[in-house]
Image: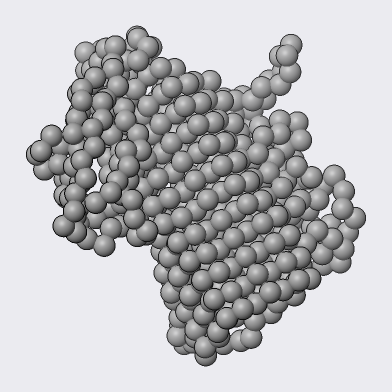
Amino acid sequence: MKFTITAVFNRSVTLELENEAIFRNPEEVRVLLDGTEVLRTDRNVISLFHLEPDQEYEVTVEAQGSSETVLFHTLKESACLNVKTFGAVGDGVHEVTGALQAAISCCPAQGTVYVPKGTYLTRPLFLKSDLTLYLEQGAVLLGVADRNAYPILPGMIRTEEGEVNFGTWEGNPLDSFASLITMMNCHNVNLIGEGALNGNADQSDWWAYPTRKIGAWRPNTLFIAYSENINVQGITVENSPSWTVHPYYSDHLSFLNLTIQNPYHSPNTDGFDPESCSDVLLLGTVISVGDDCVAIKSGKYYMGVCHTQPSSHITIRNCRLERGHGSVTVGSEVSGGVNHVDIRQCEFVDTDRGLRIKTRRGRGKNSVIDEISLVNVSMDRVAMPVTVNMFYFCDPDGHSDYVQDQNPRPVDELTPTIGSITLEHVSIHNADAVIACIYGLPEQPIRQVRIHDLTADFLPAEKRQQREVLMMDHLEPISGIPFWIKNLEQLELSDSTVSGGAGEPVIEAERTEIRNVIYKR
């Protein structure tokens, strides 16, 4: 059984099976460390913990009558500081912020702050560079419930060298409460282990007034800003006040084998929101939340023009994305652009939409969405598997004539662009309204959509609904339509089958190439 060592830290390792299977291997594999079995699993991405620093290990994976062995060496560690030595009591009752922050502040470069089993009630903690924070299995960092205990990060301040922002809210530089874990201007930080970050929002008032600014805007649970070389491995992140894991203007990031979970009805609790970030890997992660599972962003107009940084080279692989609104969403705050997003070997289950791209007039000329690919992905009970909407009616002016006009408008400084979107080897079961609904601007049509080897079927007619597929005006609810495509320059559709639909496809493209496409009622 072939596999690749993806990441090695001082006390853990992550490996990935080399196969074409989606999220899970067809059969269970045995994982041996130095000849001793330590795990049996069918997951494609596997993390091992409880290792010793600066040690050589031999890991073997056995399955299907074959095995492979690879040597790896854990990283060195300058010191290991147990938070209990600093007075942290893990009883979940007494607040221990000072003890936890003291351990973090005292830790030398390349050292580890070790959190043993227990529940540690804490206010927001701020990490620093060249640090490993290790959460042992059963260790929980629990956010205090009172919002008055949270520092406020200023949205934007002016310095002699220009502007810098700390707080952010839905694409704008606005005052926001600090997150349970904040990394600000950090490099070389590892947050690893089998423990949990619990935002404790289910026991506070964070979700009670989701659209009101009370003191400041709601915090994330994990916020990574202006940082690089950050790795998060193994942990669970849950009960977030708003977006759960939010990397912001940061580069070279990996998120491995995470579990991100919030109640289904919790407002604006996206799972993973990289915003204006590059070189991001989301691997082997399970997300089940109250909004989009993954939402890739790059700010609203001010940030997109004055602090332009696209989100680029985002890889999402071997993940399970379930419940929530969208499995992988791009937008709508994309004024800085998004490019080179590669989604593969993932399963989408019980979400409203699968791949969802949303923008609108007003996002600006830097809002270029390009090179988005969805390859070897399965979807089940995803109502609207693919939606692309350039009339998204967000923001106070969302229903204005400017945003919703179906007639061509001048292409100017405020016009967004969508380039290339590719779907290959995609299987869809139990869809509802439409397989793919793609709607460009009349003055700026989507450049290219390629769909190859797509197999899809619908729910039985008696279980389908008439749905408002795109959040835009002037589009009637639809049900059981294979493809609804308008304002597109080039469509390539080949070797695909759609079964169980109720209506004919609607396709309006300047250039259309359709080969071996079968529609079965």
On the picture, is 290 further left or further right than 65?
right
Asked whether residue 84 appears in the rendered view, the answer is yes
- Foreground residue among 86 and 132: 132
Out of 134 and 396, give the one closest to the viewer.
134
Task: Give the side of residue 130 with respect to residue 79, left or right.
Answer: right
**Left or right: where 404 falls relative to 117:** right
Q: 453 above or below 264?
A: below
* Whether residue 200 can be seen here: no
Picture layout, residue 127 above or below residue 175: above
Q: In the image, is 258 to the left or to the right of 337?
A: left
Of residues 118 and 304, the one drawn nearer to the viewer in this rendering? 304
Q: Is residue 223 above or below residue 441?
A: above
Q: Is residue 43 above or below residue 236?
A: below
Percent x, y for residue 79? 27, 12
Q: Residue furthest right?
A: 410
Please state the horizontal and vertical placement of residue 66, each as a whole percent of the image: 18, 53
**Disc count in the image?**
0
Given the current orientation, which residue lies at the most extreme bottom position? 521
Q: Residue 349: x percent and y percent? A: 41, 64
User: What colour scheme does the image use?
Assistant: one colour
Where is residue 466? Give x, y as percent.
58, 79
Q: Residue at x 70, y 77 (%)?
A: 507
Examine the image and state in which quarter residue 235 appears. Answer: top left
Residue 231: image quadrant is: top left
Instruction: Name the residue located 66 percent from the left edge and 51 percent from the top edge.
Output: 370
Residue at 20%, 38% in the rendered image: 59
